[in-house]
Image (cartoon, coloured by chain):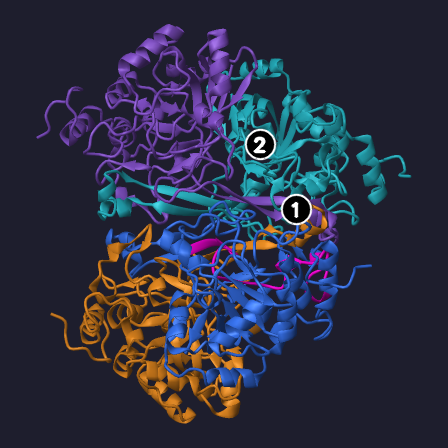
Chain colours: A cyan, B purple, C blue, D orange
Amino acid sequence: MPRPYTEERFTIADLHCAADRFSNWGKWGPNDEYGTLNYITPEDIVNAGKLIKKGKTFALGLNFDRNGPQINAWGNRFNPIHLMLATGTDAVSGRQDSIKIHYADDMISMPLQCGTQWDALGHVFYGEQMWNGYDARLVDSDGAQRCGIEKVKDKMVGRGVLLDVARYLKQDCLADGTAITIADLEATARSQKVEVRRGDFVIFRTGQMEQRLAAGAWGTYAGGDAPGLAFETCKWIYEKQIAAICADTWGCEVRPNETDDAQQPWHWIVIPKIGITMGEIFYLKELAEDCAKDGVYEFFFTAPPLPITKGCGSPINPMAIK
Amino acid sequence: MPRPYTEERFTIADLHCAADRFSNWGKWGPNDEYGTLNYITPEDIVNAGKLIKKGKTFALGLNFDRNGPQINAWGNRFNPIHLMLATGTDAVSGRQDSIKIHYADDMISMPLQCGTQWDALGHVFYGEQMWNGYDARLVDSDGAQRCGIEKVKDKMVGRGVLLDVARYLKQDCLADGTAITIADLEATARSQKVEVRRGDFVIFRTGQMEQRLAAGAWGTYAGGDAPGLAFETCKWIYEKQIAAICADTWGCEVRPNETDDAQQPWHWIVIPKIGITMGEIFYLKELAEDCAKDGVYEFFFTAPPLPITKGCGSPINPMAIK
Amino acid sequence: MPRPYTEERFTIADLHCAADRFSNWGKWGPNDEYGTLNYITPEDIVNAGKLIKKGKTFALGLNFDRNGPQINAWGNRFNPIHLMLATGTDAVSGRQDSIKIHYADDMISMPLQCGTQWDALGHVFYGEQMWNGYDARLVDSDGAQRCGIEKVKDKMVGRGVLLDVARYLKQDCLADGTAITIADLEATARSQKVEVRRGDFVIFRTGQMEQRLAAGAWGTYAGGDAPGLAFETCKWIYEKQIAAICADTWGCEVRPNETDDAQQPWHWIVIPKIGITMGEIFYLKELAEDCAKDGVYEFFFTAPPLPITKGCGSPINPMAIK
Amino acid sequence: MPRPYTEERFTIADLHCAADRFSNWGKWGPNDEYGTLNYITPEDIVNAGKLIKKGKTFALGLNFDRNGPQINAWGNRFNPIHLMLATGTDAVSGRQDSIKIHYADDMISMPLQCGTQWDALGHVFYGEQMWNGYDARLVDSDGAQRCGIEKVKDKMVGRGVLLDVARYLKQDCLADGTAITIADLEATARSQKVEVRRGDFVIFRTGQMEQRLAAGAWGTYAGGDAPGLAFETCKWIYEKQIAAICADTWGCEVRPNETDDAQQPWHWIVIPKIGITMGEIFYLKELAEDCAKDGVYEFFFTAPPLPITKGCGSPINPMAIK
């Protein structure tokens, strides 16, 4: 039997213990595929709308192209490949004269996890199960028969809160390996005078993406070491009842891993057991600067996923609107 | 020299005449790549936020999968191909034990014009030029060097208006070839008690997509005949100064073409000359039902494009929020 | 325990019995990944070279393009998608002037099983095992860790023999569902005065592809009913010790299936148990006509696979040379 | 008017002069799409068959996978992406039970120029024209309407000759920038006691690929500096009337370019003006060792292209057979 969970010790047994403590399985019934997005109420959305006061929009999506972060990437991920199906050069060369219209068409091949993205609840498993206890084998070569991203196509709307941890700690970029604790999150929120509430889309900033963009080289951004949330924040996420957690890193979680027993132990808990939708590789520069300037760290937030049937995630271009 | 434009006659000369009359080239300076999205002001966005009164969200994106409308499609378009990079069956089969995490990853190959989408201003040309007079040859095999969809990544936010033409005309689905006139648009708006204003995202409904979904067969939906806007509506779009025009059909425009001299003559004008961003293949069923029920045809609207660098469009999942 | 195999009865028990009788597992050692390609000796290749007497070449590969047979296809197969990375229209439009060369580049996305192809030994499993007893789970989302097509990159050379069953039976095309028996194969060989020998690449012709090409419509060619080898031919293939078996149909095997207990029961045996490499969707028209004309049904044969690492097959353009 | 061509001077004028001198346009009629492959006669093929004396096969195709040479590649080329459509892990996980067969399927996305390959005659242009004077604009976003690789699907068979320049010069690998001259080619052939004849597939070896494979890093192999044929060899290729020219480098031609006026000036002549099919990125290690050992530098050669309709090239796995 797993020992009671404490933050002081951290082995696979602790991980299993945390899994038990922070499980939301069954909370919204046996057929639920929304997870913590259930926390958002219509009132929350109405109230979020009231945060639109300046009419200022922030696109948090990194451009999708061959210069993306997927260098020496995790698994078989690669950067987006954009390809043309018809071009203006065809048009001007007379190759479209017979069809009596001049146009350009194009396509893209891209991993759903290659850039700014939502992880669907079918993206990470706890042992042989996914969110709510569904069999992990239901995610096969034909896609996620359960917990696909298309299931939450109308759910990604609500109040957004930025926790600018890097700015609070007066750093341009938190060092790789920095584990952001519950105390850090709380202190950041306090210093920003913003309260994290049930149903929020919480976005925290480490500065890592901006550092890499400034350097003009991604290095090990996608798959390597990073600042990020400590394992103990599972508790905070669970108890705060937030709707989603997002960051400007490739995986939200601190790396190197806080234990040798698991790869990304925090992922083991938050996606399949808490049932939270995770947003990664968010571009936060202008939003963070604006929040620092006007002192307002809350905003209307929406990041509609592409409803890719049976998708384990979706590229997105999240909008923060103040 | 082209004759003065009149709606009674319609040849290539009329088309060129309309191009002259309704051109916005240069209106926002020689370097503009936003077109009519320039009409949206911060105040418009603030006011749009006030339309969020019920906290009800509508996802207008059709699911992206192999059952999409691209059957015998225009050009070389095809339906989305969703592919797995890692699966739950791998995980349960022990193939991920060495990496100490169980996960699934996936990817997609899809034309940017295959489903619910924005057409970028680089999508259609007028002769050898695109929006604002840029050389069409700037859209080459490497993509749209000008007027790519990534340029407007933070622009797709504002007031949405639904013009439910089919419902106004008491039809489930307008017949293929039905040309919706300015009078039809105005009458629909009047009957719905909604005013179309500068900077709006105007979405009109023909019922065609719902008909095809109900039939379980797309038929010639993508590329064939359709109800849609008459050529004369170029004038309305130009004068109304709307930000974007969207529909539940594959191309907004009536088909068969209203002239033998051009393929989709309305496209020749509205995208490259007026500079309007077009939204196509919108799924409108629940939104239209809700508007009919509560009589409110305006809402907060946002449809952030994926910022695909040099893209001629983007798949989207537009959100209407009431 | 399975009953002794007889051709009169055919259930899953018979299938298992055949699997035992015709298994080559271990025959070439525990690490073998060649299967019956081991039967080809250097002398066979030298002798095959002597069959080149006229200097006439036959390309047996069907063109790879969007008009291929994958209509309503098996699994998630689709027709090849050919895409341009650089074009002559770009070149002539001046878009390549800065690089001082005018060129065109292109790419392809295609299932390895979509057209003329080799099935690798990792393509079909017997229960939880593949050829030689390897664990089927070694074919995961990262590809075939065992029995990938790259392993046999230099093996596809030898004597080819055409068994023109359709011509022997005086039919343009054998009817769907026609089960070609051992007696049919033997009679065809006899009538053609050609002997099938150990190490041969045996290609049989049903006429089905030519019929579909003539009709201009593939219909259910890929995945539907077809003439093809009866289950009993497992015995013939095993005993003849041929190197490979190929046909002008999508799957060599007769369809509908000869039993309700298994999909393509012959596949269950010949690939994983006998260890034979299978060639499908071969284009045979001109070769068959030439053989009928000169009465020579043997030739030099080579069909080098693309050495796609961990591939479960490869598109090919087989060459028959007389 | 261009000056008479001499090897001593080399400007764009010389290039144009060479283009005139070495043009084969019209030689095989106005509709020809084979170029120098026309030089191969049936007798040549019969004689080539007689070179099969040992029954030994050499696969000259580099494996196609994500570890290929396309690092920081030319244009938008990338390494092959191999993807699974069905897996053994699905099979063993019970996900295929309902279809009563256990199998794996897969696909590939790859540039046709990313690995061992034929360049089609539609791959490089001379000004606004391709081979035989066809308009370069016929290679548009829909592919090569002329001179596509599918046109020569049965032509790639004949006598192969290896010119092991590196071994002749007693080097493991010629240094980048080494321009191989006509004299070098002739001396190599003489030392190897092999005669280059009309209709031959001539393969020369620089050792560059083997060096990079041994180093475990491709570096600038694809697109950067390389040893290769001097511009003057256009004359040799033209006069020798060989069928094809192939090498173990990414582009056959020496780099850096021998002139500032053109990128890969030799390509300007040999593909569009001489009409020769070029083979690149050939893996030659074992073949070269065998030739050095037995002193026989001629062999039966075949490298059937995938007949990709309108393709500007094809990945291949060339077979040399001795």
Q: Examine the rendered structure and indicate whether residue A301 appears above or below residue A248.
A: above
Residue type, numbered disc 1: Thr
Q: Examine the rendered structure and indicate whether residue C178 appears above or below residue A4.
A: below
Residue C132 forms part of the magenta stretch: yes
**Residue C288 visible in the shown view:** yes
> Is disc 2 placed on a helix, strand or loop?
helix
Residue type, numbered disc 2: Glu
User: Which region shows up in magenta?
Assistant: C107-136
Residue A93 forms part of the magenta stretch: no
Residue drawn at point x = 25 percent, y = 82 percent? D239
Q: Is C135 situated left or right of C161 in this image?
A: right
Residue A308 position by quadrant: top right
Quarter of the picture holding the N terminus of chain B = top left
Q: Examine the rendered structure and indicate whether residue C26 appears above or below residue D141.
A: below
Q: Position of residue B3 (x, y in %)?
A: 10, 25
**Residue on which disc 2 sits:** A150
Compare residues D290 and D234 and report the one nearer the observer.
D290
Subunit of mark 1? B
Q: Position of residue C188 (x, y in %)?
A: 51, 71
Subunit of mark 2? A
The circle on residue B87 is 1
Q: Position of residue A243 (x, y in %)?
A: 66, 25
Compare residues C216 and A46 and report the one nearer the observer.
C216
Compare residues A30 and A276 and report the one nearer the observer.
A30
